[in-house]
Amino acid sequence: MCSIPGINSYFLDHPEMVMGRNSSESTAHGMDYTVEPLEDISLADQLHEAVRHIHGTYQEVELPDLGEGEEIRDTIPADPDVKNFSYALVDGEVYFRENSVMVRPQLNNTARERVKGMIGLKDCVRQLIDLQMDEYSPDSAIQQKQAELNTLYDSFTEKYGILNSRGNRLAFSDDSAYYLLCALEILDDDGNFQRKADMFSKRTIQPHKVVTSVDTAVDALTISIGERACVDLGYMSSLSGKSIDELTADLQGVIFHDPKLGTLEDLTGWVTADEYLSGNVRQKLKDAETAAAENPMYRSNAEALRAAQPKDLEASEIEVRLGATWIDKAYIQQFMYELLDTPYYLRRSIHVEYSPYTAAWNISNKRNISGNDVAAWNTYGTDYVSAYEILEDSLNLRDVRVYDTVEDEHGKPKRVLNGKQTTLAQQKQQLIRDAFKDWIWADPTRRQTLVGQYNREMNSIRPREYDGSHIVFAGMNPEIRLREHQRNAIAHVLYGGNTLLAHEVGAGKTLLASSVLRIFLSLEYECLFEFTN
């Protein structure tokens, strides 16, 4: 069973308006929200009670202010069957819908006839798309609609030119479907007409055919991933006729149950091997070993995760720099005491502190340093800034800077960068950084401890390899063939959560296909695209 998509927050805030019990059901688009009826009360009684909680008011649509020469008949309430920002014919007159009203635009006779012709083309194109999307539409119906589209197009272009012409663009570009009509024409690089689009003569949309039965558990898994974007054992059982135990036995090593994601009883938490054996596999191994101690079924999980562990790195393969937050502050403090030979009486007051909330390092009492301290003011510091201050800047990944305070023309103090002293201080900073690299691995016990910690905490991620070969692209033009890397990138978008498509020119098809599929599979309700010029 997959996760239930979110419902409208209104019903979460007002449960009294839900006439039944919140539940979920398996549909062609994954797990959808539904409401189960209550046995002890009728729907009519529930509806009567719910209406009593409605405290709204009904207001008629406010018509826009009339301009000079306009009459009330120039504006009517919007027809819900007309898409927003679209032209439509009402009693033979051209109207343009904008939000809740439809306005009759002021058009000359020629523009009006252009718009009427393109409204007819738009309606015919959408009817043809609907026919092609319906898998039960016979070829004869599609061919008949294509013949109608050809007739309308030829008649229109004979009078007013191609759809992409300047005159037609000026007349109809405000309509949201104008660029759909423009796609009916294939133009060359100079904008000259070459031919009609394939839609006039071919089936350019492959309808989605729902698979209702399969023979093997592997086929059931493929369909489940493609249709539900998850391992839905209940759905797979209905497809294959196999029991849950038979499916899990046949798919051993192909799917795993993650005890952190769900329970065995409600069939949640099952994932594919490429998902389970990726991510933080060290933590997953700990979880699997804990689960295996209670349920032997998880022993196979632990064995698979042991084989998926990243290779442990040696100290020579790990680059450590001052400011790395995974290194305990005690080591940094020990390095500071040893490098700067901090006097014992000062070690009671000078400490290294780290705040995980602000990710900031601090050295307390760093200015309480004797002027005779050679290491602090000479070897690793300067006359202007001590080694302790330089070390603090290094821990916070800042380049040290030295400023002088001078008076401006108004006699007010201001800080001015001292270039010479800044250069000298940065040279000292580099000395401290180099000394830390030599010191950190010098002690065998410290090296062994830190290498083990790094491998546990930082070298724990195994990247997931995404396979998009199973994805079904419902409604896509059968002439379009996505490449393997595009299908895999789409799978990454569907299942990865956040994805960078680091493609160069041409990533538009991958991005669009990913977004359409996320909506189709109920992983998203709306997608927003932002493009820069």
Image (spheres, helix red, strand yellow):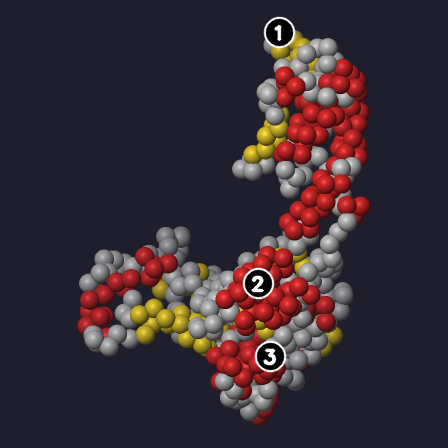
The residue at the far top in this view is 411
Compared to residue 373, the image places residue 438 above or below, namely: below
Under mark 3, the amino acid is: Leu
Task: Determine the image quadrant of residue 303.
Answer: bottom right
Q: Residue at x 66, y 29 (%)?
A: 333
Q: CA distance from mark 2 to mark 1?
A: 71 Å
Nearer to us in this view, 139 or 285:
285
Q: Residue at x 76, y 15 (%)?
A: 374
Q: Which residue is mark 1?
A: 411
Q: Which residue is mark 2?
A: 289
Under mark 1, the amino acid is: Gly
C-beta proximity under 8 Å, tags 2 and 1: no
Q: Position of residue 24 (x, y in %)?
A: 40, 72
Q: How many marks?
A: 3
Compared to residue 213, the image places residue 189 above or below, namely: above
Assess disc 2: are there few (<14), some (14-19) or many (≥20) residues with their C-alpha within 10 Å of its C-alpha. many
Give me the disc on residue 251: 3
Which mark is nearer the camera, 1 or 3?
3
Q: Residue at x 76, y 65 (%)?
A: 190
